[in-house]
Amino acid sequence: MPFVAELYFDPSTEERIRGVWKTLDEAGISDSMPKGGYRPHVSLGVCDHLETNSLAQELTTFTAKVTPFRLLFPNIGIFSTSEGVVYLGATVTAELLNVHTAFHEIFKKHAKEQREYYTVGQWVPHCTLAFGLSEDQIAEAVIVCRQMDLPVSTEVKGIGVVEVSSTGCRTLSSFSLKTSDSSELNDELRSEYDETLLKNGVRGKYAKQ
């Protein structure tokens, strides 16, 4: 069964998203998220095999370098694949990419058989509202989810690792992000991100000029 590393939000945002899950459930469209015991999140990485203890040790240090940061969800989107997903789409920012790239420098040392959709350069950051939907259910779910007041603005507060099975998910570890008035720690991650781009021969908006 897959393992998933996740970004977690502030409590008020979690409550709003759980409210949408409840509405979808009460409308008879989908109970996939509440039934599975999921927590509102953005998935950072997914793999089939994971050295959980060694990753947890590194995440203790990693999360001490990251201060909470803002994240905006301005739109409703769908993945019309076999998974049948409706989601909140996140605005891609330099800070979000910095954290994702720096995280994967750690994750790749402990994860095997990663899901490519979540790797650097392939990732579409999103918060799942429902999955396992048919085409008709996708249309119904979008109508319900469009009733949300958008954009949803949140603060990323933590990172966790869960194991997903056919019956739901189980939390293996959870870490709060460092509380600090300084951006120096996140600037350190920005530097690591830029160095990774340069190492791979990429020059872009966030690479050193």
Image (cartoon, rainbow, N blue to C red):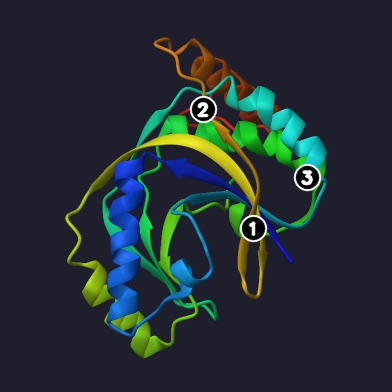
* Label at residue 170: 1
Other residues around mark 1 within 10 Å, as few (<14) / some (14–19) / many (≥20): some
Q: Is residue 58 above or below residue 46?
A: above
Query: Which marked residue is nearer to the observer: mark 1 or mark 2?
Result: 1
Find residue 177 and report its horizontal and vertical position in percent.
51, 27
- Choose between 55 and 202: the one closer to the eye: 55
Cα separation, mark 3 vs mark 2, equals 19 Å
Q: What residue type is labelled 1?
A: Arg
Cα separation, mark 1 vs mark 2, equals 21 Å
Q: Which of marks 1 and 2 is nearer the N terminus?
A: 1
Q: Is residue 88 above or below residue 27?
A: above
Q: What quarter of the picture does the N terminus occupy?
A: bottom right
- Choose between 47 and 207: the one closer to the eye: 47
Find residue 113 and report its horizontal and vertical position in percent.
79, 58
Query: Which marked residue is nearer to the observer: mark 1 or mark 3?
Result: 1
Q: Which of marks 3 and 2 is nearer the N terminus?
A: 3
Helix, strand or loop at mark 1: strand
- Choose between 96 and 181: the one closer to the eye: 181
Cα separation, mark 1 vs mark 3, equals 13 Å
Helix, strand or loop at mark 3: helix
Quadrant in which residue 136 is drawn: bottom left
Pointers 1 and 2 in contact (C-beta within 8 Å): no
Helix, strand or loop at mark 2: loop
Residue at 58% x, 19% y: name it: 65
Q: Is residue 79 above or below residue 105?
A: below
Find residue 47 and report its horizontal and vertical position in percent.
72, 56
Residue at 64% x, 58% y: name it: 170
Q: Mark 3 points at which residue?
A: 52
Quadrant in which residue 183 is drawn: top left
Q: What residue type is labelled 2?
A: Leu
* Label at residue 177: 2
